[in-house]
Image (cartoon, rainbow, N blue to C red):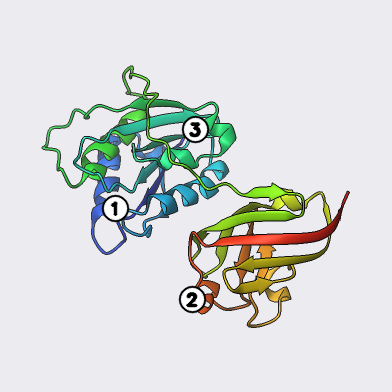
Amino acid sequence: MQTVITLLTDFGLYDGYVAAMKGVIYDECRDYKENLIIVDITHNIPQGDIKEAGYILSEVYPYFPIDTLHLVIVDPGVGSSRAILYAECKRGRFMLPDNGILSFLHQEDLSNLKVWELPLPKISRDISNTFHGRDIFAPWAAAIALDQVVKLIIKTDWKRLEIPQPVRKDKLIEGEIIRIDHFGNLISNIPKIWFDDLDLKRIHGRIKDKEFSEIYPFYMSAPDKNLFALFGSHGCLELAMNQRNAALESGLKRGDKLSINIECEVD
């Protein structure tokens, strides 16, 4: 039986931090390593950007096997008294600092989430105050992979963040840009399912001083140079430019509010 562990960090790839973590996990699982798969989700999260980490985690974890262990180490509070959490839901297992990232799991998973606080692991070397990824997260990940975790105390007061929610009222939909991907596409929190029961005739979208009036089916179907809307693979409305970086060219950024007025017939 294979065990999948994913890594999502803000470590980057210039230093050896990611490799050190993997080294500890493989060393602790040396007699089991043939059955261990470590997957890098990304290590390019902007430094300390908890929201970016949370949104990327929310996009990715549903596609992994349900017993996957997701290590999320974006940890501005490393070395402080913040807790380290282990959590389980129907679609995955998670190990991460208690800084709010768990709040980004999908609502159906939050509703059945169980959370524990992890104590310091038993290791032979000193624990660095600046590298808990290597000295705490990695040994615990190995222990979980080997089913060596002892009984833990459930933690109910883990930190929760307020996640921006879109609003739909009659013909007006309001949301905001929650992240910008590598291509400069501006991903909103407005779900595609809100449009599934609408026979769209025309929309009037606005974000700051920019306007858009049509939802296109894919990137190349839109006119060059114009900001346009489409539904991305994440299941939400996004704004893009055909073969251009929409974020750079428009100056729009995460947190910018957008609104869509719809002239349509409801099925």
Q: Amino acid at mark 2?
A: Leu
Give whichever of 117, 16 is nearer the camera: 117
The residue shown at (44%, 38%) is 102
- Disc 3 is placed on an element classified as loop
| Image location of residue 117, percent across then percent down | 32, 27
Front disc: 1 or 2 = 2
- According to the image, label 2 marks what residue? 248
- According to the image, label 3 marks what residue? 67
Q: Is residue 243 above or below residue 56?
A: below
Q: Is residue 1 above or below residue 165?
A: above
The residue shown at (37%, 44%) is 72
Distance CA(mark 1)–CA(mark 3)? 22 Å
The residue shown at (41%, 26%) is 115
Position of residue 264 in the picture relative to residue 112 (left or right): right
Position of residue 105 in the picture relative to residue 13 (left or right): right
> Label for residue 18?
1
| Image location of residue 21, percent across then percent down | 27, 46
Q: Amino acid at mark 3?
A: Asp
> Label for residue 156?
none
Disc 1 residue crowd, few under 14, some 14–19, many 20+, Cα 10 Å = many
Q: Is residue 176 visible?
A: yes
**Quadrant of res 24:** top left
Distance CA(mark 3)–CA(mark 2)? 39 Å
- Disc 2 is placed on an element classified as helix
- Disc 1 is placed on an element classified as helix
The extreme bottom residue here reads 224
